Image: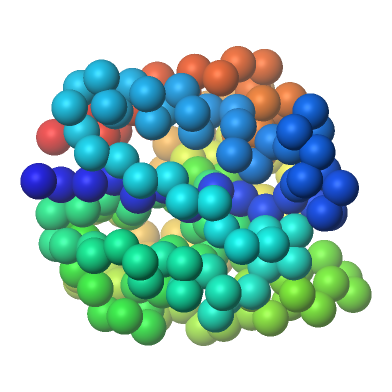
Amino acid sequence: MRTVYIIHGCPADKETAMNPEKRTYDKHWIPWFKRELLLRGIKVEAPLMPNPWEPDYDAFKKEFAKYKISEEDLLVGHSCGSAFLVRWLGESKQKVSKLILVAPWKIPKKGDEFRKAFYEYPIDESIKSRVKEIIMFTADDEVDDGKKSLKIFHEALGGKIIELKGVGHYTLDDMGREEFPELLQEIVAN
């Protein structure tokens, strides 16, 4: 049975991440999306990655190693979760059915050593030979570094780009909604 794995993004700081009222990296569309998949009988995992305000690839990889990924599975990453999945696919050489990157991010903020170590890696272009379908979501009002990041991933991996209007970086504040039917459609369409 196929499983959908969702890797969340990385909040700006620890205070935002640890305060349930401010925290957004495990909110916005992810809980809604998870519920919708479960209602359709699709198995889903959405692990909380360790200390995502200071993303560490090895720590994320250790957490993700708890799961047995198969060729039938689908991987969904939001923001820095996209960067993690692309790097992991390059290192592991794992085959998967589908890779969906939502507002993928690859550009560290100046002076942020955690994100520099997390984002600055060469993309293994052979990933596209091991993934049956690659889809990238962006928005017309995504910030410039987000648009540049999308371009970096797309030039290396190809795939389909879906651009939605007025949803920014696909956070609750930017989208103004928890529902993300466009993403759900890309999963249930198979």
Residue in front for this viewpoint, 18 or 127: 18
At horizontal 56% and vertical 19% (from top left) the residue drawn is 178
At horizontal 61% and vertical 62% (from top left) the residue drawn is 50
Q: Is residue 161 above or below residue 112?
A: above
Horizontal placement of 52 versus 136: left or right?
right
At horizontal 21% and vertical 53% (from top left) the residue drawn is 73
Horizontal placement of 122 versus 174: left or right?
left
What count of labels does the image hold? 0
Residue 148 visible, this angle: no
- Residue 17 position in % (x across, y down): 76, 47
Q: Quadrant of residue 89?
A: bottom left
Residue in front for this viewpoint, 136 or 83: 83
Q: Is residue 54 above or below residue 150?
A: below
Q: Is residue 181 above or below residue 55?
A: above
Q: Quadrant of the C terminus?
A: top left
Horizontal placement of 24 versus 75: left or right?
right
Q: Quadrant of residue 70?
A: bottom left
Residue in front for this viewpoint, 155 or 18: 18
